[in-house]
Image (cartoon, rainbow, N blue to C red):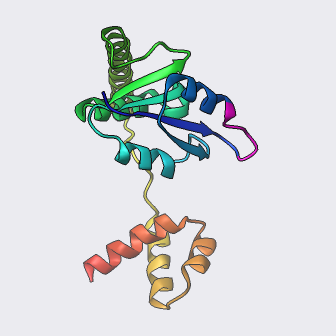
């Protein structure tokens, strides 16, 4: 049997990790990765360290499911990767998940099926909406700028005006300006 690794996370620096750490100690966790950052943040250094540190036969333990992932899709991706690497996953409170047991694998499989169903439903709704828009004569995507605004962008770029000035004068975003500036440089 491998190591038991704990991932403790709270959303703000004011919150306390003590409850999670105590639960890990009772469980026999040998190494705890501690993080004080919102789960919505993509950059969670301690989570990444733990995922890199974990080896085949290890089990990653979280106090509560939402400590590891903020969405079902993200959770499925992480645990699927762990399973491929031979690493178990266990949740101490809330949902009874322990992928090192047949029951836990079943529960997690149901979560995975629900996530896949949700993705397919979303895709179906998007496609139906696009088809309805096309039938009504509308085309999906962002509207393009009028020719006079495109000409003004080209003139201002040729005069080497700053992007901030151009964006403010024409009431466009920097990303819109970048799109037209890139198109012009590619055509040249």
Q: Residue at position x 44%, y 71% from top? A: 178
Q: Is residue 64 above or below residue 10?
A: above
Where residue 114 sits: x, y (%)?
A: 37, 16
Where residue 164 sits: x, y (%)?
A: 59, 77
Specify whether residue 17 is painted magenta.
yes
**Quadrant hosting residue 57:** top left
Q: Quadrant of the C terminus?
A: bottom left
Q: In front: 134, or 118?
A: 118
Specify whether residue 62 is painted magenta.
no
Q: Is residue 161 above or below residue 68?
A: below
Q: Can you see residue 135?
A: no
Outermost residue, bottom side = 159
- Judged by its main secondary structure, the magenta piece is loop
Q: Residue at position x 73%, y 39% from top? A: 15
Q: Residue at position x 38%, y 43% from top? A: 51
**Quadrant hosting residue 169:** bottom right
Outermost residue, right side = 14
Where residue 37 sits: x, y (%)?
A: 61, 46
Q: Which residues are magenta?
A: 13-18
Q: Is residue 21 above or below residue 157?
A: above
Q: In front: 46, or 44?
A: 46
Q: Quadrant of the N terminus?
A: top left
Would residue 63 appear left or right of 115 to someone viewing this image? right
**Marker count (numbered):** 0
Q: Can you see residue 85?
A: yes
Would residue 9 appear left or right of 160 to someone viewing this image? right
Q: Residue at position x 47%, y 36% from top? A: 30
Where residue 88 sits: x, y (%)?
A: 34, 27
């Amino acid at each position: 049997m491998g190591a038991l690794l704990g991932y403790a996370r709270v959303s703000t620096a004011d919150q306390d990790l003590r409850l999670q750490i105590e639960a890990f100690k009772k469980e026999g966790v040998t190494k705890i990765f501690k993080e004080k950052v919102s789960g919505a943040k993509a950059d969670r250094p301690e989570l990444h360290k733990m995922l890199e540190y974990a080896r085949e036969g290890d089990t990653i333990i979280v106090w509560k499911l939402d400590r590891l992932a903020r969405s079902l899709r993200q959770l499925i991706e992480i645990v699927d990767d762990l399973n491929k690497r031979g690493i178990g996953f266990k949740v101490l409170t809330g949902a009874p998940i322990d992928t090192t047991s047949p029951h836990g694998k079943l529960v997690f499989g149901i979560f995975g099926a629900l996530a896949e169903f949700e993705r397919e439903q979303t895709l179906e709704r998007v496609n139906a909406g696009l088809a309805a828009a096309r039938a009504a004569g509308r085309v999906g995507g962002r509207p393009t700028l009028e020719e006079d605004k495109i000409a003004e962008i080209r003139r201002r770029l040729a005069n080497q005006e700053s992007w901030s000035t151009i964006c403010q004068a024409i009431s466009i975003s920097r990303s819109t300006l970048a799109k037209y500036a890139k198109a012009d440089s590619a055509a040249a």
